[in-house]
Image (cartoon, grey):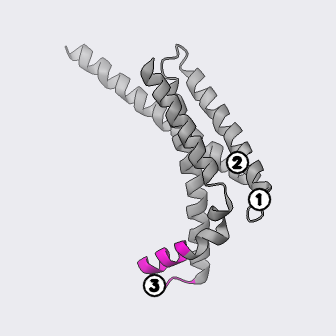
């Protein structure tokens, strides 16, 4: 029971991190100079168009990653459920709710815009994490059954 509260604490903390990244200080305009310098230090001859494309990919990848972590944490907090689909369904529902809240918050910000596309990316990131976790659990179960059968 104590461990479960720790997982839920991690979920709450991670939601705080996500909503913290929602502020103006993490807008495209604010992150662009930093990312441009980083990209140019790796590939000095990179064109402005390539820089913009990579900036877009990094920002959208960060969305997917943030929500993948959220889904995994929620799934872990709910792992003792008797129904294996319940944790995944609740995790995805929470991912969706936080993504909508995040984008709504961004829509009210001066330097940000809310985006249904970002909500879709967030949910896709969460779903990808849940599929990966399901695959890893299934693999673990198969190996455990093979060990038991061997003896």
Tell which circle, 1 or 3, labels the residue nearer the N-terminal end.
3
Query: Neighbour class for label 3 at 10 Å: few (<14), some, many (≥20)?
Result: few
Question: Which quadrant of the figure has residue 127?
Answer: top right
Which portion, as a residue range, is magenta? 34-47
Q: Which residue is mark 3?
A: 44
Vertical placement of 83 versus 35: above or below?
Answer: above
Mark whose residue sits in front, 2 or 3: 2
Kind of element beneath mark 3: loop
Q: Residue 25 location, x and y as percent? A: 63, 64
Comparing 87 with 29, the one in front is 29
Cα–Cα span, label 1 and label 2: 11 Å
Kind of element beneath mark 1: loop
Q: Which residue is mark 2?
A: 102
Residue at x-position 67% and y-position 57%? 23
Residue 109: which disc?
1
Kind of element beneath mark 2: helix
Judge whether residue 123 is colored magenta. Answer: no
Cα–Cα span, label 2 and label 3: 35 Å
Residue at x-position 55% and y-position 63%? 58
Tell which circle, 1 or 2, labels the residue nearer the N-terminal end.
2
Question: Which quadrant of the figure has residue 137?
Answer: top left
- Callout 1 touching callout 2 (CB < 8 Å): no
Vertical placement of 1 versus 109: above or below?
Answer: above
Q: Residue 136 location, x and y as percent? A: 41, 33
Query: Neighbour class for label 2 at 10 Å: few (<14), some, many (≥20)?
Result: many
Vertical placement of 89 versus 49: above or below?
Answer: above
Residue 128, visible in the rendered structure? no
Residue at x-position 62% and y-position 27%? 89
């Amino acid at each position: 029971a104590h461990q479960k509260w720790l997982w839920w604490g991690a979920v709450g903390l991670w939601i705080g991190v996500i909503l913290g990244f929602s502020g103006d200080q993490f807008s495209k305009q604010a992150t662009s100079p930093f990312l441009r310098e980083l990209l140019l230090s790796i590939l000095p001859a990179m064109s402005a168009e390539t820089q913009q494309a990579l900036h877009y990919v990094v920002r959208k990848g960060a969305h997917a990653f943030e929500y993948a972590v959220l889904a995994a944490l929620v799934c872990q907090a709910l792992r003792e459920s008797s129904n294996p689909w319940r944790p995944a369904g609740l995790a995805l529902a929470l991912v969706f709710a936080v993504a909508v809240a995040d984008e709504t918050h961004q829509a009210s910000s001066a330097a940000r815009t809310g985006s249904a596309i970002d909500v879709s990316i967030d949910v896709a990131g969460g779903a990808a994490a849940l599929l990966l976790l399901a695959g890893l659990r299934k693999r673990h179960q198969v190996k455990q059954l093979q060990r038991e059968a061997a003896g």
